[in-house]
Amino acid sequence: MGPSGRETARKIQLRLMWPLALLLLLNSLDRVNISFGALQMNREIGLDARAYGLGVSIFFMGYFIFQAPSVWALKRWGARRWLFAVVGAWGTAAAAMALIRTPTDFYIVRALLGFAEAGFAPGVIYLAATWMPIRYRATAIATVMLAVPISVIVGGPICAWLMSQANPLGISGWRWMSLLEGLLTVAMAFVCLRIFVDDPKDATWLSGASKDWLSGELRSEDAVSTAQQDRSLSKLVRDPRVWLAAATWFGLLGGLYGVIFWLPQIIKQLAGGSTLAISLIAATPWLASLVGSLVNAWHSDRSQERFLHCSLALFLAAIGLAVAASTSHLMLALAGLTLSGLGLGGAQGTFWTIPPKFLGRTSATTGVALINMMGNTSGVVVPLVIGAVRDRTGSFVASVYVIAFLLALAGLITQLIRWLCARADRRHATAASTAPT
């Protein structure tokens, strides 16, 4: 990679990926504040574990339904206006959490928030694919995904502190926290109009040489892709790799959401303590997740290997959860959760480098949206299962074992995708060698 390429990659990382990471941090804070807010909110508005799990799941129902229209809007409007609309809408819905009074209010606001956030995650992956060459994409995506563990490491104690402080409106701590974080997100929507552009050719911070290098790199990737032609939705649906990738994402998100939404309540059951103390303990697995994301993505880009880096991380996450579920000792359970966080971070940073291998850039928007949409059904299923099992058994143990199984299965499926991609590459090479010249 020549000097122009190095400089271009650095600028894209700084001017695109880090701002997207900040937006994802605000996006993830919603998951964090609801998990800590539940420590006060559930009692105040009359939610048991099953009802709380239903509210979490309803978010993903809206998320699932509106994801395809949101990604379509990204392609039609461009990144700048799309980000303004999406970020502004979810910030408004997040702030509205401060107004809820009943379980029904909770369900309605969570559904609206799901609608608003629906296309953000696949949109970020699409933007990474259209700006960053694949050889550096794992690090670029991992940079954005760092927002998830950071949101818990930093956001958890902030949420706990806001919940414990008196406020000028005299409202409950969890309401004050929701209001402030929602309004901050709305403010960031207006910042999006200033800092983002729709296409690399519109970026004034890239020189002509940098734009030429980037355009050449992306064209070269299209030329060697096993799916270099634009494919219709019907063809994507018939590709088993799309469904297997969705199943992998389902298992990975099942583990991620299980930890994000329920970890504070699990720690409270194991150790008790104040909300601030719980938030500090809960940050430990996410510190490990941050390390796992950075190290695994760096090594994946260095070796240019994706599948083993993803599947081994998933196996590690499954083992960690199984250890945590098998003991009632706080420190041993925390060690298992930390091991799981290491694996979850490592898998999340590398997974999204795999679909472009068989989608190609031209089909990336539709394919990524389809995989993300189907995988996110775990957000509907897993919280409902955890809440129902928790109410029935009085413990989280059985639910954690189920999540560990899903993660291990996702690791195996990743290797199956690897085999199918290798077979497709062999067929493509054979067809090319026998084609008339």
Image (cartoon, helix red, strand yellow):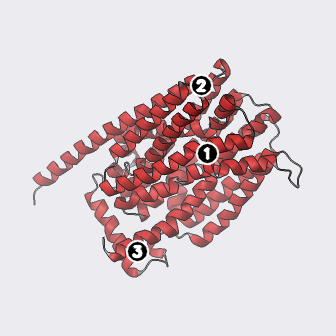
Give the residue pinned by disc 3.
7
Secondary structure, mark 2, is loop
Q: How crowded is mark 2: few (under 14 residues within 10 Å), some or many (20 or more)?
A: few
**Residue shown at 72%/37% (left/top)?**
107
Marked residue nearer the N-terminal end (2 or 1): 1
Relative placement, left or right, of 407 versus 62 is left
Q: Where is residue 169 in the image (x, y as percent from the top left)?
A: 88, 53
Residue 389: image location, x then y, percent: 62, 22
Of badges 1 and 3, the one in the foreground is: 1
Identify residue type, mark 1.
Ala
- Viewer-proximal residue among 390 and 276: 276
* Residue plotted at (53% across, 54% down): 146
* Amino acid type of the residue that numbered disc 3 sits on in the rendered structure: Glu
Is 200 rendered above or below residue 148?
Answer: below
Real-space Cα distance between discs 1 and 3?
35 Å
29 sits to left or right of 357: right
**Amino acid under disc 2:** Ser
Q: In this view, does 323 lie to the left or right of 431?
A: right
Single out the residue that lies furthest toward the top. Answer: 393
Disc 1 marks which residue? 283
Q: Mark 2 points at which residue?
A: 328
N-terminal-most mark, 1 or 3: 3
